[in-house]
Image (tube, grey):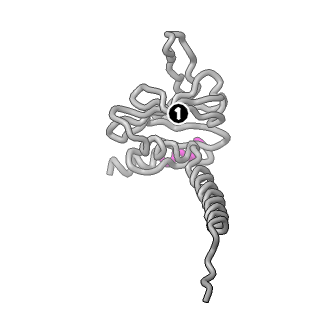
Amino acid sequence: MKHKAFSLIELLIVIMIIGVVYTLVVGNFNSIAEEKTKLTLKNLKEYLLSIEHEESVKILCLDDCSECDILVDTQKYKSIEDFVDEDIKVYRYDALYGYTKIEQEVYFNVEDVEEDVCFSYEVAKSGVGSQVLVEFKEKFYDYTSYFSKVQVYSSMAEAQEAREDLMREVKQ
């Protein structure tokens, strides 16, 4: 009685097919995971908090905001393109005046050349971020809360009202 078995060539072909299928499947899972973690103003605070750091992590967009850098403990970690544009506005809350527009700081690069900051947001070691309201594309992103996620409002009046409600609640 003769035993039939697979030849070495047939086994190699099957292993190659399995390898190609595995590569295609893993590649699709990686692209799905990247799409889920796409950086937006709504998830910016959580994204920065997820990066390991000792002192602070900051997003810094210079000039026309076409490219932003993620700085971890003042060292460049990653560059991001097309995150925001030059139409972004940043406000700070004042109890007497409400939200007032703040001018961004000046930044000196490694060659000690002055550059204009279009947008920046920083999270410290303690997990506390810059206390600002960001206006971009007709939405207002509220970064003023220490413990909750970023709130999104459709108008500055709505953000102002939410802030005043919070102030009243704290005073009680």
Residue in the image at 64% along x and 61% along y: 16
Magenta span: 156-162
Report x, y in % for residue 148: 42, 51
| Badge 1 amino acid | Lys
Residue in the image at 61% along x and 64% along y: 15
Query: Which quarter of the image is occupied by the N terminus?
Result: bottom right
Query: Is 23 displayed left or right of 91 in the figure?
Result: right
Q: Up-down: is 106 above or below 1?
A: above
Between 131 and 61, the one nearer to me in the picture: 61
- One can see residue 157 in this view: no
Residue in the image at 39% along x and 29% along y: 73
Residue located beneath label 1 in the image:
78
Count all numbered tags in the image, as a single digit.
Answer: 1
Q: Residue furthest bottom?
A: 1
Query: Is 142 displayed left or right of 166 in the figure?
Result: right
Q: Residue furthest top?
A: 112
Q: Up-down: is 62 above or below 44?
A: above
Report x, y in % for residue 53: 37, 36
Q: Up-down: is 2 above or below 10?
A: below
Instruction: Decide whether residue 161 is among the magenta residues.
Output: yes
CA neighbours of label 1 inside 10 A, class few (<14), some (14 to 19), many (20+): few
Q: Up-down: is 164 above or below 27?
A: above
Report x, y in % for residue 118: 58, 25
Question: Of helix, strand and loop, which one carries label 1?
Answer: strand
Instruction: Decide whether residue 37 is among the magenta residues.
Output: no
Between 104 and 3, the one nearer to me in the picture: 3
